Image: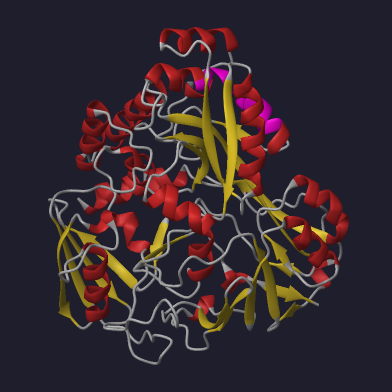
Amino acid sequence: MRNIVNIILLTVFASLVMVGCSNDSKSKTGSKEEVAKKGGTVRIAMSTEVDNLDPYLSAATDTSSMMDNVFDGLLDTDESGQLIPALAKEYKISDDGLTYTFQLNEGVLFHDGSELTAEDVVYSYSKLAGLNGNEPHSSKFEIVETVEATSDYEVVVTLKERDSAFLARNIAAIVPQDYEEQSTEPIGTGPFKFKEYKVGQELILVKNEDYYQKDKMPKIDEVQFKIMPDQESSILAMQAGDIDVIPGVTAQGLNQLGDSVETVSGPQNMVQLMAMNHEVKPLNDVRVRQAINYAIDKDVIIETVAEGKGTKLGSNMSPAMALYYEEGLEDYYNPDVEKAKALLKEAGYEDGFTMELTVPSDYQFHVDTAQVIVEQLNQINIQTEIKQIEFSTWLEDVYNNRKYETTIVGFTGKLDPFEVLGRYVSDYHKNFMNFKNDQFDALIKQAIAETDEAEMATLYKEAQTILTEEAAAVFIMDPDRTIAMRENLEGFKMYPIQKFNLEDLLFKE
């Protein structure tokens, strides 16, 4: 069973290889003569505020990217998407696929000096799965039936039923037993320690001198994440020498920076979409949702908003996940204004209607996308008003409470196809689009229990087709991500999930 699962994972993750480490600005000269300089402080501009320092309470991708350096999981991922050892040096899976046994590294220290043991894993997974008598912190861990420490350095996890997606979930942070101050003074085992957080200003991490992975010991001393929602301010700060890294810089920003920076770029394995609340009229009518899809020209959005650097999508899967990606869906709704109008007439909305498009103001890319969509929907008499709100408010109103009509969002990359498509399962508690389809649910359930990779891929492809045919959302693109960094800084890598490998950064003299 273990061999079968490993083959599946290796095949899937090999298909996620990203276009990484490509220098788009200028190549270095004389780099062989440059000498690595240990130490120093790296300042990174972040466009969004921290939503919660506790890894089990945070929902924001940017926050997870920053705090991932404070916490380690049993497993980690490399830049190709393959799972690699972290706190667990090895694991085995039972023949029935229900029992996972992890052997932990010994001598691992939390940032408070206490040693990691199997009891910390039991505590962490019990919180995630709700085995401690409280509500689960993650619905993805509700599949866990028991977690047992069979020795100081061995943990046995038993699932309620077979779940092919579970292994990839073991990148989840492990926290120290009975410590409840993660939201204010987070403690993990990662390569960097938490130092300070100032709301709306900065998050500071410092090198963990006791990091257990000696080959991944950080080369820099400190990382300062500067909260800068306005990218123009970030550009000016980098030009002034006050910022070293801008993740997700725009093409216009790169033009402003000129030859003073190096870049790393590639696909993100992210799906940008316009989500529609299926419980709000008239969006509960599939014909209306299809009309909206026919009215929106994704190619125009890619050219104008992403400046051509994006891959057009037709369902909630990026071609970065090649094994599971269903080709051809990106052209299912070729722009057709007349067809869109006919569908609206059939649905009883010949004269159109008005609706609200809620957008997190912290993400200019989504705001720009919304502005293009407003103009395109105007062609079929759908008058759309953009409502900009802060991301923290978006999380509360849209993601948690489903109080919205339509919104623009980016679903970040995951390491397993279920983590991508499971968002649309009817009873998934974060299915904020309120998408419900019995056939889709059945396909996902079959895929989770499947161990044959070819059959699993077929099931996930069928599920994608349903999302497209039912116009679950307007699936727009997987935009390329470009990281701009100062000339003498190097080491950033691209991953199939948004991840900052701060331990690899170094300055060159």
* Nearer to the camera, 109 or 145: 145
Image position of 355 (left or right of 118): right
Residue 273 on image: x %, y % = 51, 36
Residue at the (50%, 78%) spot, across then down = 191
Q: Is residue 395 magenta?
A: no
Q: Can residue 15 be spotted in the picture? A: yes
Residue at the (39%, 85%) spot, across then down = 110
Q: Is residue 295 magenta?
A: yes
Residue 424 on image: x %, y % = 33, 38
Q: For residue 245, which quarter of the picture?
A: bottom right
* Nearer to the camera, 80 or 406: 406
Q: For residue 166, which quarter of the picture?
A: bottom left
Q: Can residue 414 be spotted in the picture? A: no
Residue 258 on image: x %, y % = 87, 54
Residue 207 on image: x %, y % = 56, 83
Part of the protein shown in magenta: 292-303
Image position of 89 (left or right of 509): left
Q: Is residue 218 above or below residue 442?
A: below
Q: Is residue 497 above or below residue 443?
A: below
Image position of 207 (left or right of 240): left
* Nearer to the camera, 409 or 341: 341
* Nearer to the camera, 276 or 96: 276
Residue at the (22%, 48%) spot, across then down = 163
